[in-house]
Amino acid sequence: MRILLVEDDAVLRGVVLRSLNDAGHRVDVAANAEDADHLWRVQLFDAVLLDLNLPATAAPTSGLTSGLNVLRHARTRGDRTPVLVLTARGRTEERIAGLDAGADDYLGKPFDLAEVEARLRALVRRAQGTDDVATLGRLKLDRKARRFTVNSFPLDLPAREFEVLWELMSPPGRTVSKRAMSDKLSTFDESLGDNALEAFISRLRKKLVGSGAAIRTLRGIGYLLEATA
């Protein structure tokens, strides 16, 4: 998944960023309301992890005075990206304000990093209409365990190949354009080019032989993971 992490506390931001990266996600970060609004406007994300108490760097007339304002701006322009808001534990009014502004879920600080991952996964699953387990042919993806298997045997993949196959299985049978795939697997600091993507696709095709699933290239459109005989 490509996630926008919005948190002004540098220590907490670093801890969450490392946890999400270790889980295989691509993460862009913002430390204030203005940067968060800008990143959210120019890039599509699978989910946003948003602290409501953010410092404002823009002029007060911009309305970007808090994470709550950033969320309201996004919902006003029709952006339906799943949002998990972070609030101070025990601050009921913050949770209510976040949910009323369009947040999909909330988590009180301090929180468990595994719960952050689980809640984000659940939000994206609901938004995409996918289940924790996806099967195509003899290929199976367990999203909760972050594991691919073929005939119940683990399919070991390097991180980037894993991410490419994950996108093609979310859900299977969906055509994914090169641009969309590259965007999902990039950050503003690290971009995935067409040549690298094609190399990952080529290696995955070889590893999927005998799995009952294959990657088909739709010229000028993108890639499709489909069942084979």
Image: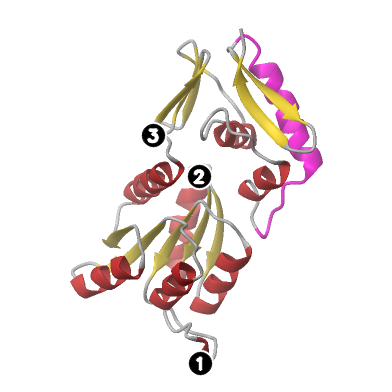
Viewer-side residue, 175 vs 168: 175
Q: Residue at x 40, y 49 (%)?
A: 120
Q: Residue at x 58, y 12 (%)?
A: 212
Q: Residue at x 39, y 32 (%)?
A: 132
Q: Is residue 123 left or right of residue 204?
A: left
Q: Nearer the viewer, mark 3 or mark 1?
A: 1
Q: Residue at x 54, y 73 (%)?
A: 37
Q: Residues within 10 Å of mark 1 (few under 14, many from 20)?
A: few
Q: Is residue 132 found inside the magenta-colored segment of the image?
A: no
- Count all numbered tags in the image, as a single digit: 3
Distance between the Cα atoms at labels 2 and 1?
A: 39 Å
**Position above or below: 102 against 191:** below
- The residue singled out by tag 1 in the image is 61
Magenta stretch? Answer: 188-210
Q: Is residue 86 left or right of residue 35?
A: left
- The residue singled out by tag 3 in the image is 144
Sequence-wise, the earlier of marks 2 and 1 is 2
Q: Amino acid at mark 1?
A: Thr
**Position above or below: 179 against 219:** below
